[in-house]
């Protein structure tokens, strides 16, 4: 009897091993054919990491192979944050998440009137997601990602869209293919109609997330004003181009196609991020993605920023040392800086050292090369890990407000010419007034949104 029992146990063990092998092979095939279903199955067994700081990864997580920054840079190599080109197994968020949406409210003493431009740099940890509401009612999402293994940005951006009753996205603008900028882009396309999709060239990345996004973008449709289903309009971010609406324009600059870098390493992947100047009512907001010294030098040499006098700079690459060079700061002459990152100035995140102390020193020490009658240097630097979501509001009258989720360092700017240096129109005594002369807003020839090459 003992010998028969041992035989039965051996057969049972062999059967279990065979079943496990078959299951492993089936999962491998499923991953190769349908990675989205594979991720859903894995997510049932691997719960999402609750930590939103992005300072540590799950055991076994490795970075996607990628280039390194220049010697001596404290940013770590492999900036994509996506291990092995797979999608994040920790993504369990579904549409209609429970996280409270961040909807800015105007302060009592606001100087913003008329049609308002709203630019919301969302606090989503180590990553980028910017929601823009243009003064003519159109909207844009610029990037929608966060670091692998950290909380997905989906509940934050979807909460905002639900609160604002958004059913259709006019523009999805992807600056480059890193995971912390595209993580939930496909989910956005799956859940919302998108009219225009702006992307870098196809070869800008080689990860599964990027490839799935390309397929989703190619298949995206929207319903036009007459109720007819149309294919979404796909645009490649190459050279100079402009996105325009009623009384606003966003001029974008990146590499010409002949000069477009090969995107095998992290540095050129980041460098394809367009630098965009969003202009309305005499104000200019500079949007940068993960731009770095490669494209900054290239675009400066082209003379694209020779006559820029900006108000707000979204600091590139989460405050990396190799981005936002001194020459670039001198050219754009901004007064406020916003950094989207999981680290603070006192405690930069451990993995990438963002925001980098050398970059922060550069921002604090910045002074105008030539005095232009406005504030000399940066009035304030906003870091999302410190103050939460940062919202820039520009009124039709040129008024400028900067609101923060925490309520700290909020700014209410003057609306007209001749404000005196040192006067503060708001309640926060940490800020000063004095906006200088406001040039005329850029006005297109008609009221329709057009996409044309920049002059």
Image (spheres, rainbow, N blue to C red):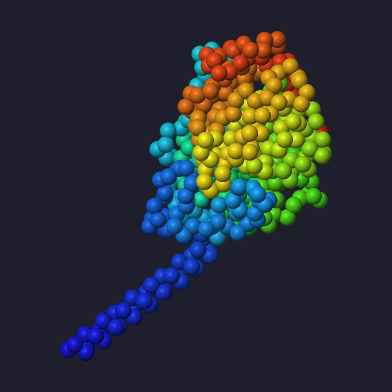
Instruction: Residue 84: give x, y in percent of width and height.
Output: 55, 60
In the rendered image, which quarter contains the C terminus? top right
Most extreme residue toward the left is 1
**Residue occupying the point 73% across, 45% down:** 294
Residue at position x 46%, y 60% in the image = 60
Q: Quadrant of residue 143?
A: top right
Q: Is residue 146 left or right of residue 330?
A: left
Q: Percent position (x, y) of residue 122?
A: 53, 35
Q: Position of residue 318 (x, y in %)?
A: 59, 40
| Residue 336 in picture, x, y percent from top left | 63, 26
Q: Is residue 159 visible?
A: yes
Please give the name of the residue rendered at 46% of the width and 35% of the height, measured from the top-left corner: 159
Which residue occupies the foreground of this view, 93 or 3? Answer: 3
* 295 relative to 367, above or below: below
Q: What residue is rendered at 29% in x and 83% in y? A: 10
Of 142 and 426, nearer the camera is 426
Using the image, determine if residue 381 lies above or below residue 428: below
Of the 4 image quadrants, the one containing the N terminus is bottom left
Q: Is residue 208 left or right of residue 258?
A: left
Relative to residue 43, is residue 119 drawn left or right?
right
Residue 242 appearing in the image: no
Instruction: Depth check: give the residue in front, 4 or 224.
Output: 4
């Amino acid at each position: 009897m003992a010998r028969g029992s041992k035989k039965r146990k051996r057969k049972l063990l062999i059967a279990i091993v065979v079943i496990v092998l078959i299951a492993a092979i089936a999962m491998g095939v499923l991953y190769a054919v349908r990675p989205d279903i594979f991720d859903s199955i894995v997510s049932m067994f691997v719960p999402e990491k609750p930590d939103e700081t992005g300072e540590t990864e799950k055991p076994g997580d490795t970075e996607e192979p990628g280039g390194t920054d220049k010697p001596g840079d404290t940013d770590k190599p492999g900036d994509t944050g996506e291990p092995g080109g797979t999608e994040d197994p920790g993504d369990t968020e579904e549409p209609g998440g429970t996280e409270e949406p961040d909807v800015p409210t105007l302060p009592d003493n606001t100087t913003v009137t008329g049609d308002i431009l709203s630019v919301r740099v969302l606090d989503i940890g180590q990553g980028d997601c910017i929601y823009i509401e243009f003064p003519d009612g159109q909207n844009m999402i610029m990037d929608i990602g966060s670091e692998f293994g950290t909380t997905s940005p989906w509940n934050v951006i979807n909460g905002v869209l639900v609160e604002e009753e958004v059913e259709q996205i006019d523009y999805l603008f992807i600056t480059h293919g890193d995971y912390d900028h595209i993580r939930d882009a496909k989910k956005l396309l799956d859940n919302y109609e998108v009219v225009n999709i702006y992307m870098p060239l196809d070869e800008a990345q080689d990860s599964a997330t990027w490839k799935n996004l390309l397929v989703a973008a190619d298949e995206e449709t929207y319903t036009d004003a007459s109720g007819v289903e149309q294919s979404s309009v796909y645009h490649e971010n190459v050279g100079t181009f402009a996105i325009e609406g009623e009384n606003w324009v966003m001029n974008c600059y990146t590499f010409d196609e002949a000069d477009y870098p090969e995107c095998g390493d992290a540095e050129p992947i980041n460098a394809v991020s367009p630098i965009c100047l969003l202009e309305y009512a005499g104000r200019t907001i500079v949007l940068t993605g993960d731009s770095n010294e490669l494209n900054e030098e290239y675009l400066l040499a082209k003379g694209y920023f020779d006559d820029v006098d900006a108000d707000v700079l979204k600091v590139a690459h989460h405050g990396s040392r190799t981005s936002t060079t001194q020459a670039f700061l001198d050219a754009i002459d901004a007064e406020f800086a916003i950094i989207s990152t999981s680290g603070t100035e006192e405690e930069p995140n451990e993995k990438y050292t963002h925001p980098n102390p050398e970059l922060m020193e550069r921002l604090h020490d910045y002074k105008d090369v030539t005095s232009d009658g406005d504030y000399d240097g940066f009035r304030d630097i906003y870091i999302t890990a410190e103050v939460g979501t940062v919202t820039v509001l520009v009124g039709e009258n040129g008024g400028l407000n900067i609101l923060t989720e925490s309520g700290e360092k909020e700014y209410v700017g003057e609306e007209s010419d001749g404000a005196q240096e040192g006067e503060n129109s708001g309640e926060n005594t940490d800020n000063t007034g004095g906006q200088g002369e406001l040039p005329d807003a850029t006005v297109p020839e008609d009221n329709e949104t057009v996409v044309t090459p920049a002059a």
